Image (cartoon, rainbow, N blue to C red):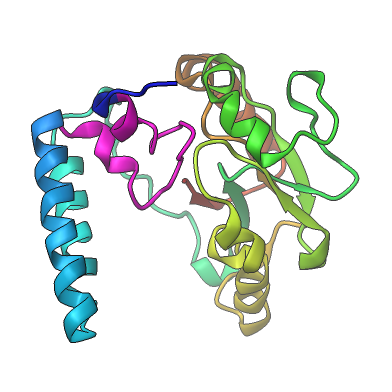
């Protein structure tokens, strides 16, 4: 099956090659993406000879910044900063992520599919992007070996190796023990952020916010991917 260069560069964003490090390629024009790859190959060749890989990393970071500095599709209404009504050391804090985490044995079964694999989630990313998000509850004492992540929009290997990079349950429990935060809500929440953004903004999100208010949260740590 043939593939155009446009399709190739876009496949790193919610596609067959989904990769958070190179998701930015979709925001580049074909000409810009070609320049990025040409310069990347030059720097890879230099690094192979010199053993210095720093210029390769810096090259990717510079192009990430360039791509994300452009105009965005989504425009959000601004709201005034809402200060905490109490010191952080007295606040009840929740954790909310868009990382697609769930507890083993409590699979949300997207589209009614039991035990959907990460590979299938990637293939069906267009369906996820049109679907209403589903919120999963994760008890904060859940052992890391019982945590699962499935999300067609990013490479989940990092969070599988260490859930705290995107689901910082252990770090927040430590902050609670140290008295930095008053208390950590006993349940965290996660959903697949690659979902219908209009439904999230207009219907699902406001309903969740009301639920979190009723749960007594003073503030929440938000971890988007």
What's the residue at 55%, 24% (across, down)?
206
Percent position of residue 152, x then y? 56, 36
Outermost residue, front side: 1
Outermost residue, right side: 105
Q: Which residues are magenta?
A: 7-28
Query: Does residue 123 belong to the magenta stretch?
Result: no
What's the residue at 26%, 22% (across, down)?
73
Residue 187 appears in the rendering: no
Taking the image as shown, residue 190 lies to the left or right of residue 58, namely right
Q: Up-down: is 15 above or below 58?
A: above
| Count of number-bearing discs | 0
Percent position of residue 74, x then y? 29, 23
Q: Up-down: is 169 above or below 104?
A: below
In the image shown, does 1 or 55 lie closer to the viewer? 1
What's the residue at 68%, 81% (across, down)?
177
Q: Up-down: is 81 above or below 71?
A: below
For the N terminus, the quadrant is top left
Percent position of residue 87, x then y? 49, 67
What's the residue at 63%, 53% (across, down)?
94
**Picture quadrant where residue 99 is located:** top right
Percent position of residue 95, x then y? 61, 53
Taking the image as shown, residue 215 lies to the left or right of residue 94, namely right
Q: Up-down: is 200 above or below 145?
A: above
Taking the image as shown, residue 3 lies to the left or right of residue 201, namely left
Residue 220 appears in the rendering: yes
């Amino acid at each position: 099956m043939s593939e155009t260069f446009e399709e190739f560069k876009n496949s790193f964003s919610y596609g067959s090659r989904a990769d958070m490090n190179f998701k930015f390629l979709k925001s580049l024009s074909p000409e810009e993406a070609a320049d990025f790859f040409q310069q990347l190959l030059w720097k890879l060749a230099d690094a192979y000879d010199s053993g210095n890989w720093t210029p390769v990393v810096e090259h990717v970071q510079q192009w990430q910044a360039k791509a994300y500095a452009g105009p965005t599709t989504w425009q959000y209404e601004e709201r005034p900063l809402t200060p905490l009504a109490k010191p952080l050391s007295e606040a009840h804090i929740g954790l909310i992520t868009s990382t697609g985490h769930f507890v083993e044995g409590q699979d949300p079964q997207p589209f009614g599919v039991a035990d959907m694999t990460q590979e299938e989630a990637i293939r069906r990313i267009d369906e996820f992007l049109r679907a209403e998000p589903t919120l999963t509850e994760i008890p904060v004492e859940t052992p890391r070996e019982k945590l699962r992540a499935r999300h067609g929009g990013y490479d989940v290997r990092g969070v599988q190796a260490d859930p705290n990079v995107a689901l910082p349950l252990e770090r927040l429990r430590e902050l609670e023990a140290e008295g930095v935060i008053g208390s950590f809500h006993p349940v965290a929440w996660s959903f697949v952020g690659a979902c219908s953004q209009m439904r999230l903004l207009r219907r699902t999100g406001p309903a969740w916010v009301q639920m979190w208010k009723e749960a007594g949260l003073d503030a929440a740590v938000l971890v988007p991917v």
